[in-house]
Amino acid sequence: MKQYRIATIPGDGIGPEVIDAAVTVLETAARRFDFALAIERLPYGADHYLATGETLPEPAFTHLRDDADAILLGAVGDPRVPGNEHARDILLGLRFRLDLYVNLRPVTLLHPDLTPLKAVRRSGGQAVSGDVRVTTRPPDIDFVIFRENTEGMYLGRGRTEGDEYIAEEVNTGRGVERIIRAAFEWAKAHGKTRVVMSDKSNAVPAHTIWQQKFRQAAAEFPGITPEHRYVDALAMEMVREPERFQVIVTNNLFGDILSDLGAGLVGGLGITPSANLHPGRVGLFEPVHGSAPALAGKDVANPYAAILTSAMMLTELGEPDAARALERAVRAGLSAGVRTPDLGGTAGTRAAAAWVAEHVATEDRA
Ligand code: NAD
Ligand code: IPM
Ligand code: MN
């Protein structure tokens, strides 16, 4: 039987609760789909940092790099660590040091009533004024964001000179090229026909490298229409016509912001997953959401983002059937009204996870 070594870092706030939920569902999936999981729980996070001064010690890093098949992280961030230095070492540290240059963030409408856009006035897909046809049909939102994950504004480079607080954004030709290529390759492999690259080259001269690399890569993918949007215009269009998007590729900071905007289009941070990837290396899987300190310990956090993140992990591990079963179970839970308070329901974190696990175990296998 195949066995996968999963290292979990539950982290802070709601992180431990949503990871417990995901582990319950993963264990059920392993039983149904005949694989084994060796799940390990690592203590790194704010408590550990405040108690020991350690963020992510070197032996833990090499252990994760060399001995795990996947890393599943809840969230890091705690009001007692206002400088967020432990999160920088753990989360950004893993992204950078494992060179996980792809941050893949799908935005999918899993149930029609989850989008705040459902009552939008539309005519032929275009929002128009005046004599409009009003339809309550929700838009079919299903796109992925390829967020560059190893450079941009996130390297923390810069300096302070008197009154000037200077942050430097790093865009290397190699870094920009590889994320753009990853987006095109994913589009091709998944039968998509458009890739939208977003930058701010009209204001930031360094972003011309994005234009150059995008043109070069697009020439190699003749079946895919390349489009460009400045990020401000893209944000507007994502709200007006999200169904037009298939694949969006952008830099680290814009990708961070747009992925929360995307989450807002499909039900919020409680249900959006992400994967930090570098083909051939161990991946780091985490919900898009953070530690939501105000919700911690109350059994109200939505576990669906962590469960869908686990599905992305199973896909990468080579268990796509199990991954699809998790996704079907979450959709079924949403349809059956098994929803935590962020989605207007009354289910608790544990109850929602138990329902999903039960669905994975017992759904009609025909
Ligand atoms: P957040 O994602 O924690 O919360 C934003 C809003 O979404 C809050 O209203 C919260 O209650 C809600 N929310 C988030 N996840 C939810 C869930 N699973 N179920 C129900 N509601 C949910 O973002 P924030 O408030 O900006 O940040 C809080 C802390 O988390 C900060 O320290 C931040 O740096 C950190 N953070 C960590 C990660 C990560 O570890 N991957 C990601 C984002 C933010
Ligand atoms: C995310 C988070 C992180 C980021 C923070 C916690 C550093 O917002 O994973 O989206 O900005 O990448
Ligand atoms: Mn974010």
Image (cartoon, rainbow, N blue to C red):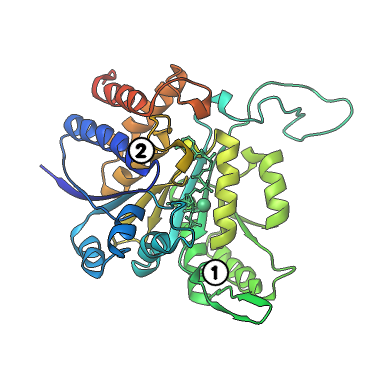
Tag 1 secondary structure? loop
Among all residues in the image, which is located at the extreme bottom? 161
* 355 vs 229, nearest the viewer: 355
Crowd band around label 2 with a 10 angstrom C-alpha radius: few (<14), some (14–19), many (20+): many
* 129 vs 305, nearest the viewer: 305
Q: Is residue 223 visible?
A: no
Identity of the residue drawn at 33% across and 66% down:
98
Label 2 within 8 A of ligand 1 by Cβ? yes
The spot of residue 342 in percent (x, y) is 51, 29
| Tag 2–tag 1 contact (CB < 8 Å) | no
Please determine whether, in this image, residue 363 is positioned above or below residue 77: above
Please determine whether, in this image, residue 48 is positioned above or below residue 358: below
Please tell me which of labels 2 and 1 falls first in the chain.
2
Identity of the residue drawn at 23% across and 54% down:
69
Q: Marks 2/1: CA distance?
A: 29 Å
Q: In which quadrant will I find the N terminus?
A: top left
Report the residue marked by disc 1: 152
The spot of residue 172 in percent (x, y) is 52, 76
Seen in the image, is 191 located left or right of residue 10? Answer: right
Q: Amino acid at mark 1?
A: Gly
Quarter occupied by residue 354: top left
- Label annotation for residue 171: none
Q: Nearer the viewer, mark 2 or mark 1?
A: 2
Q: Amino acid at mark 2?
A: Val
The spot of residue 313 in percent (x, y) is 32, 46
Identity of the residue drawn at 56% across and 25% down:
112
Seen in the image, is 18 located left or right of residue 173? Answer: left
Q: In which quadrant will I find the C terminus?
A: top left
The spot of residue 161 in percent (x, y) is 64, 83
Identity of the residue drawn at 56% across and 68% down:
153
Report the residue marked by disc 2: 18
* 252 vs 350, nearest the viewer: 350
